[in-house]
Amino acid sequence: MRERNADERPVAAAGGGVSARPLLREDRGGFIDRHDLWTEAQYAAAGQLRRVIDELGIEMVRFSFVDQHGILRGKTLARAAVPAALRSGITAPSSLLLKDTSGQSVFPVFSADTGVGVRGFSGAGDIVLVPDPTTFRVLPWTERTASVLCDVRFPSGAPVPFCTRSLLRNEIATLAARGYGMTVGAELEFHVFCDPGTGLAPEQVGGPGRPGAPSAALPTTRGAQLLHDEGLDAMQPLVDALYRGLTLLDLPLRSIELEFGPSQLELTMDAGDAVDVADAIVLCRTAVRRISASLGYHATFMSRPRGAETASTGWHLHQSLYDLATGAGAFVPETPGVPLSAVGSGYLAGLLDHALAAAAFTTPTVNGYKRYQPYSLAPDRIAWGIDNKGAMIRAVGGPGDPATRLENRSGEPAANPYLYIVSQLVSGMDGIDRGLVPPAPTSQPYAENAERLPSNLGAAVDALTGDAAFRAALGDTVVEWYAAIKRAEFDRYLRHVSDWEQREYFEIF
């Protein structure tokens, strides 16, 4: 006689086998149930979430999605409203997906035809934030508050094509259909300044398309002393707080390091599943900013803020594929003296071939392109090297090394993590499909006669819109939507009269 599982339910109770779906009638039939948007694991996580809320006395839960810029946006709900949100999600204005980094709407959001190429955005109508209970975290920097990441759907239940978290999951599913999984690891640099704590001045108040003046900030470290123990000691109260906060969030923190530039630190994370690491990056950046602010610091993931002339910050993305059936690394070569397998070589060639277009995702801000300078531990041209940290792509490992991987050093820490990883998958898999062969590795990455990385955001967006592989993978609608938003951002930058222009020309002409 078969042993009955304690969680098994009869068909009359929505069972028919092991299931975590809710038994109570009032918990069924909502938006999520009707459109079958959760897996069994998510239903189980939702039940655990509600128990933790009760046990810890959580009073508020933030339900947030990651917008096109990698920024968390959402609503904070009182405890009593959480069950309804877990049944039917939370509505938010669809116009949030049509704005640039200043909050300015790029498309005519109140028109019947917004011009975005997708129905469901007219009149700034609602979208539905669908919680993913597996991402539930209790926030360590505030009292009795938790957070949940969400995906985005239309009220009809249809997917919103501009949900960046879903875009990555779709690419991972396509990869899995080919028998591969993806592992990524992150090295994330950032700056920490002293915040004078004087509050907002009138000139710091801005509006859409017109951000206010930045906060005043003072340096925290002198710079030019990479990995100096005593330099990190001077930041110890913050380092301790970051360690406690990030580990309480269950993020895969590996190290906290003093970087080369003044006021510059770095976090590294253990390698893991691509979607999980992308989620961790989103939470990590928020945690770093909030924990720093609680101690009187201002942390920024802007690549090259003022005061960072000697070293900009980057986001080095380690990546590899593995065989889903065996777990074996797909980039590990079998031939001695060869740095990569045939799969790894094709993937690498794809990263190089599509580097111009991918830059729109790896470096999505105007400021990030000011990092591409020679002899700066940042790449300035499209080349690869074997364990060479000046090249855009660094190959690590070799025969017999299961950790053989590629490290893209061109990204900036402000990048949307889902789109950054998507750009790598689209590029690398196209290289495999076309049987591309990479050029010889460079030993002089800053002297190599190779094509330069884009000099500005506009050039990167132009390359993206002309790239057939990205259009085939993401669709014309997604490419044109993203390009329009980034072009609007770049055009505002070009119209701005900078302090350099004023100093250079005002007195002599």
Image: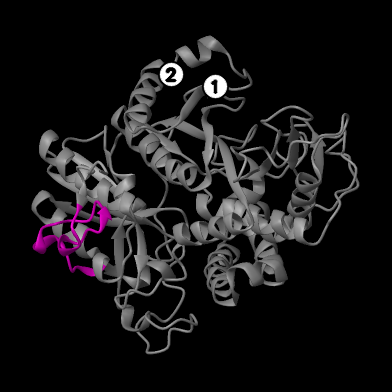
Residue 371, how many percent across, how many down?
A: 66, 43
> Residue reaching furthest front?
1
Which amino acid lies under the numbered mark 1 shown in the image of this protein?
Leu
Q: Quadrant of the N terminus?
A: top left
Q: Is residue 30 magenta?
A: yes
Residue 372, how many percent across, how many down?
A: 71, 45
SS category of the residue bearing label 1 = strand
Task: Give the residue drawn at x 79%, y 49%.
Answer: 382
Task: Give the residue drawn at x 46%, y 53%.
Answer: 70
Q: How is the structure coloured here? A: one colour
SS category of the residue bearing label 2 = loop
Residue with the mark numbered 1: 258
Magenta stretch in the rendered image: 9-31
Residue 108, how many percent across, how many down?
A: 42, 82
Left or right, residue 185 beside residue 66 = right
Which amino acid lies under the numbered mark 2 shown in the image of this protein?
Met
Query: 225 above or below 282?
Result: above
Residue 366, how many percent across, how many down?
A: 59, 55
In the image, 476 versus 375, the foreground residue is 476
Does residue 254 show up?
yes
In the image, 146 versus 39, the foreground residue is 39
Q: Is residue 51 magenta?
A: no
Query: 375 above or below 425?
Result: above
Circle count: 2
Residue with the mark numbered 2: 235
